[in-house]
Image: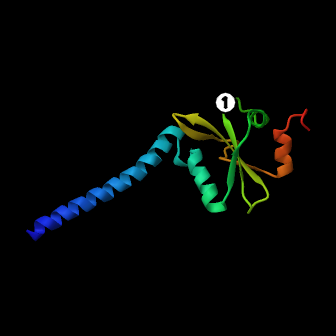
Amino acid sequence: MTWLRLSIVACIMSTCLIGYKAVAQTNNEVYEQTCGAVGDALAVLQQFFEGRWNARRAELDYQAARNYLNYHDIEDDASVYVFQSRFFKDFAVVVARPVNDIMCIVKIDGRLHKEYPPDVLHKILSTEKAI
C-alpha cells in the first residue's frame, strides 16, 4: 500500500515539474518563432533594462519616431522606444514592430539598441521647424 502511495505522489510531482518547465519553454519558443530569437523580443529587452538598470521606457510620438526612422533609413512602420536610467547619462533607443501580437526588435547596425547622449538624440528627433 505504501508503494502505491509513493508512486502516486511521485507521479503527481513529476507532472507538476514537467508542466512548469513546459510553460517557461513555451514563452521562449513563442518569442523565438516569432522574432527569430528570444532576445529579439522587446518584452525580453525591456525586462532586462528594468531589472538590471531600473530603466524607464517611453514611446516616441509619431513625428519623433518618423524622424528617428528616417535618420537610420528605416522604411518599416515601427514604433520607437527610449529607455532612460539614472545609472547612465545616455539614452538607449529601441525600434520594434508588431509580429503576431508580439513586438519584435528591428536591429540597427546589427544592434538591438543604440545609445545616444541627450543633445545628439534631441537633434535626431527634432524637426528643423522645431529647433
Q: Is residue 7 left or right of residue 95?
A: left
Q: Quadrant of the N terminus?
A: bottom left
Q: Is residue 55 left or right of residue 29?
A: right
Q: Residue 84 at what x, y percent from top left?
A: 73, 54
Instruction: Give the quarter of the image for residue 73.
Output: top right
State how the image is colored.
rainbow
Question: Which residue corresponds to the image point at 76% horizontal and 60% vertical from the top-left?
Answer: 88
Question: Which residue corresponds to the image point at 57% horizontal and 47% vertical from the top-left?
Answer: 43
Provide the secondary structure element on which disc 1 rests.
loop
Instruction: Give the quarter of the image for residue 11.
Output: bottom left
Reading the image, the residue beneath label 1 is: 77
Amino acid bearing label 1: Asp
Question: Which residue corresponds to the image point at 84% horizontal and 44% vertical from the top-left?
Answer: 122
Q: Is residue 18 left or right of residue 102?
A: left
Is residue 37 or residue 42 the one in the foreground?
42
How many C-alpha atoms fall within 10 Å of the one at disc 1: few (<14), some, or many (≥20)? few
Q: Residue 127 at what x, y percent from top left?
A: 86, 34
Where 99 sits versus 40, above or below? above
Q: Residue furthest left?
A: 1
Is residue 15 or residue 107 the one in the foreground?
15
Instruction: Give the quarter of the image for residue 79.
Output: top right
